[in-house]
Image: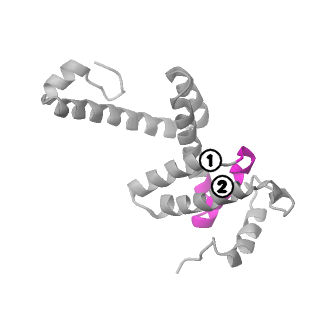
Amino acid sequence: MALNWNAPENWAKWIRGCLKDPDNEIDLAPQALAMVTGQDARALHAIAACWDLALAGDEDGVNAGLAAAAALLDGMQEKCWPIARELLAQQGEWSDRAKIWPRVLARRAARALSWRGSVRDLATDLAALLTPEQLAELHRALVRARRDAITDMAELRGMDSADAVSSYGQVDEFGGDR
């Protein structure tokens, strides 16, 4: 049975591991954690559950866990976010922080920018946050989403695929209209 890192008796071991890790971004001394409010603590507990879902779930679980964690960051002080990042090591491996945390920040940035700013601003911000591989993955997902939207629209209007493509534009493999 896997160790339950959220159990209070295991926190000391996790904190010792964080202190030894050179990539640790937070000071885990008791006085440094005084910044964590009741709301921050509740959000951190919820984020720990998100990491469990994201690291142990299927593709839908991964996406749901990352989206939920990104949404929960809005309920925390930004100076407490590094603690949420460190919690990834509780549920998975230390290396998961470098793989998953940027994806969560990108989702949060996309959510925050979706209702303000232009598409160009969003693209600029995402380019600064994501690695080239993550940008390519995002691009492929957007192309798939656009194709799915065109197909769904065609089905709703009783059109066949050829009519939908001519009416709404065909998406090529690079995401542009043909």
Direction from residue 10 to residue 67 in the image, left or right: left
In depth, the one of 34 and 39 nearer the eye is: 39
Give how far across and how far down residue 53 sits, in percent.
48, 61
Q: Residue furthest front?
A: 38
Give me the residue at 55% from left, 77% from top. 2
Q: Nearer the viewer, mark 2 or mark 1?
A: 1
- The answer to whether one can see residue 127 in this image is yes
The amino acid type of the residue labelled 1 equals Leu
Give me the residue at 55% from left, 62% from top. 49
Magenta-tinted stretch: 77-97
Classify the position of the C terminus by image quarter: top left
Q: Is residue 71 above or below residue 31?
A: above
The numbered mark at residue 73 is 1
The amino acid type of the residue labelled 2 equals Ala
The numbered mark at residue 84 is 2
The numbered mark at residue 111 is none
In depth, the one of 137 and 52 nearer the eye is: 52
Q: Is residue 7 above or below residue 109?
A: below
